[in-house]
Image: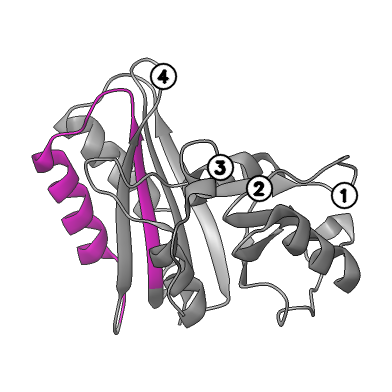
Amino acid sequence: MKYHMDESYIDDTPNAFLYQQIMDRYPKSVIGCFIISEDWGEQALLELKEKSEAWFLVGLQINDMDFDRLDIIEGIVRCQPEDVNQVVKLLNISPRGLIGIDVIDIKSLFEREKSYKFIQTHITDGFDIDMAKKAANELVGQFPKNLNIKRLLLGMESSESPSLDNISYIVAFIEKNVMADELYTYYCTSMTDEPNSFHLKAIYAEA
């Protein structure tokens, strides 16, 4: 199935949006995100998908609560409660960055693996090649040792447009230091209004 973006999804419709059952209405989005522990039942999820007109749903798992409705949603991202907004921001990608992907790429990741984990690192004292090295080292250090990764989405968010040299360094460093029999990856860049900021965010699936 190939997704065609119609005019209703241009400009004012986010690629990803976090929904809560207490909302009076569900705004449109392409990727509907929800927190699993808020006890979304089958009917509630079906209504969410219909009313939001979301192309697919992604559950955010912030505790050990099991979820058995994978036939309704596309996948799960495990994260800490304080990281929920950053996960949604990563999925709310823009094709207009220096390196851009779109929702078709996001969906292809979840079609290959259902369960992902979120990690991040945030540098706030400028961005140059040394900061790129520091951020990449900190991110790699969060992967469990001897982990064989199968799928990876890495977002680079900065207060100024990163150079191609910095991007190339980060990509090469991560791919060199992550164990993978066959690594399927997407990379994207975006801008932030936070001054002197560089943020690496990733979701990955284990082998």
Q: Residue furthest left?
A: 165
Q: CA distance from mark 1 to mark 2?
A: 15 Å
Nearer to us: label 4 or label 2: 2
Question: On the image, numbered disc 2 is attached to which residue?
Answer: 28
Looking at the image, tell me whether mark 1 or mark 3 is earlier in sequence order. Answer: 3
Question: What is the crowding at mark 3: few (fewer than 14 residues within 10 Å), some, or many (at least 20)?
Answer: some
Q: Amino acid at mark 1?
A: Gln
Which residue lies at the image location 87% right of the left edge and 49% below the top edge?
A: 21
Circles 4, 2 touching at the beta carbon (< 8 Å)? no
Residue 193 numbered tag: 4
Circles 2 and 3, Cβ within 8 Å, touching? The answer is: yes
Q: Residue at label 3? A: 13
Q: CA distance from mark 4 to mark 2?
A: 25 Å
Give SS at disc 1.
loop
Which mark sits nearer the N-terminus, 3 or 4? 3
Q: Is residue 52 left or right of residue 43?
A: left
Q: Nearer the observer, disc 1 or disc 3?
A: 3
Magenta extent: 151-180
What is the C-alpha distance between the residues marked 4 and 1? 30 Å
Q: Position of residue 144 (x, y in %)?
A: 47, 65
Q: Horizontal and vertical percent for residue 202? A: 43, 54
Q: Nearer the viewer, residue 91 or 163?
A: 91
Answer whether residue 167 is magenta in the image. yes
Badge nearest the viewer, 4 or 1: 1
Q: Earlier in the sequence, mark 4 or mark 2?
A: 2
At a point 43% along the width and 40% down the height, the residue shown is: 121
Estimate the spatial distance between the alpha carbons at disc 2 and disc 3, rounded to whole Å.
6 Å
Q: Residues within 10 Å of mark 1 (few under 14, many from 20)?
A: some
